[in-house]
Image (tube, grey):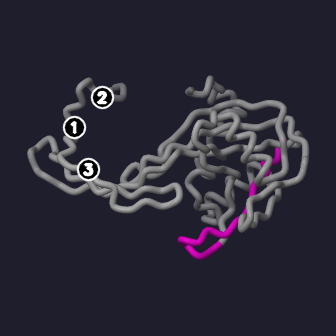
Amino acid sequence: MGLPSAPDPDPLAEQTLDARRAWQGSFLHVYQDRVRCPDGHEATREYLRHPGAVMMVPLLDDGAVVIERQYRYPLRRSFIELPAGKIDPGEGLLACAQRELLEETGYVASDWAYLGGFHNAIGYCDEKIEVFVARGLSQQGARTDAGEVIEVFSASVPDLLAAIVDGRITDVKTIVGIHWLQLHLAGQWPARLPPR
């Protein structure tokens, strides 16, 4: 049995009755909409709009992954993560990946492979994270933004998988990125062309 595809029009779609921006930040926007569900029930939907992001899986020549640790204020602690960053207005995905890799880790890459994208919080946010594997790395020196304090190091794929299993890595984008990398290196996840 295969997976069902959504028909067009989608019978599960909700009809927007009223939409309003409840709050606007420097790059996040909170919306509160009133909708009619397919069964006729009316409900409120609160969600964040996000410009989208890229995540890089930087692979060193010895097979280790460049990884970082940074403090995440909402949870009041540091997390081990793959480097990532938001897409600037009008910026292409690869250009964003190249910029963010250099800014956060100090590396530039000569070889880029796009693995795809995923929505990380579909219940309350429209953010999509696009994933690239970066190879042929050379160190140029990090160029972090003011207030962006990042500890950069490297770790083997088995060590990163063990840290996911034992709960030391809980960041969803990093979990996805390491698993996709593992499949990619095994020839089970082909690179593809990034969307425009």
Q: Does the segment drawn in magenta span residue 65?
A: yes
Q: How many marks?
A: 3
Secondary structure of residue under mark 2: loop
Q: Which residue is mark 2?
A: 6
Of the numbered discs 3 and 2, the one sitting upstream in the chain is 2
User: Residue at 88% across / 39% down in the picture?
Assistant: 61
Relative side of 34 to 169, left or right:
left
User: Residue at 68% across / 40% down in the picture?
Assistant: 96
Give x and y (percent) for residue 181: 68, 39
Q: Which quadrant would residue 92 be assigned to in this image? A: top right
- Report the amino acid beneath label 1: Leu
The foreground one among 62 and 34 is 34
Circles 2 and 1, Cβ within 8 Å, touching? The answer is yes
User: Residue at 71% across / 54% down in the picture?
Assistant: 160
Q: Does the segment drawn in magenta span residue 34?
A: no
Quarter of the C terminus within the rendering: top right
> How many neighbours does mark 2 have within 10 angstroms: few (below 14), some (14-19), or many (20 or more)?
few
Secondary structure of residue under mark 1: loop
> How many neighbours does mark 1 have within 10 angstroms: few (below 14), some (14-19), or many (20 or more)?
few
Give x and y (percent) for residue 2: 36, 25
Of the numbered discs 1 and 3, the one sitting upstream in the chain is 1
User: Residue at 63% across / 58% down in the picture?
Assistant: 164
Secondary structure of residue under mark 3: strand
Relative side of 139 to 73, left or right:
right
- Report the amino acid beneath label 3: Ala
Quarter of the N terminus within the rendering: top left
Provide the residue span drawn in magenta: 63-77
The foreground one among 12 and 95 is 95
- Report the amino acid beneath label 2: Ala
Image vertical order of residue 107 relative to residue 190, above or below: below
